[in-house]
Image (cartoon, rainbow, N blue to C red):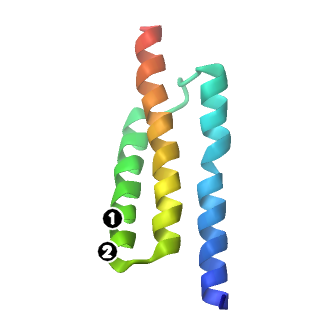
Amino acid sequence: MNLTDLIGTLAALLTTLSFVPQAWHTFQTKDVSGISLGMYSAFTLGVALWLAYGLMLQAWPVVIANAVTLALALGILAMKLIYQRARN
């Protein structure tokens, strides 16, 4: 692994793992009051587009990181919709 791949892999790992605490906290507390529906919707679409871009380039670190991030972002977005509806 060269330095470029190492930096890219570490960046992907850190940015992807940064969503785990938010997803876990939201799942445990069911508190979605601090989550912006507009922001997470736009972010999730952006991650999906990054995933498509990575697939087109066959850039596997980009694909893997964005596939995991997309799953986490979709989970948070789903909890936002479900828990917010349950509160209203």
Could you say where residue 20 lies in the image, as x and y percent from the top left? 64, 44
Which numbered marker is on residue 56? 2
Give the distance between the C-alpha atoms of the residues marked 1 and 2, in whole angstroms. 6 Å
Figure check: 66 above or below 59: above
Q: How would you rate the neighbour count of disc 1 (Cα within 10 Å): few for under 14, some for 14-19, many for 20 or more?
A: some
Which quadrant of the view contains residue 63?
A: bottom left
* Residue 52 - label: 1
Q: Tell me the amino acid under the disc marked 1.
A: Ala
What secondary structure is marked by label 2? helix
Let me know if residue 36 appears in the view.
Answer: no
Few, some or many residues within 10 Å of mark 2 (<14, 14–19, 20+)? few
Is the residue 71 above or below the residue 5 in the image? above
Q: Residue at x 59, y 66 (%)?
A: 12
- What residue appears at the point 50 percent right and 35 percent down from the top-left corner? 76
Mark linked to residue 88: none
Instruction: Report the residue at 41% width, 8% height from top.
Output: 88
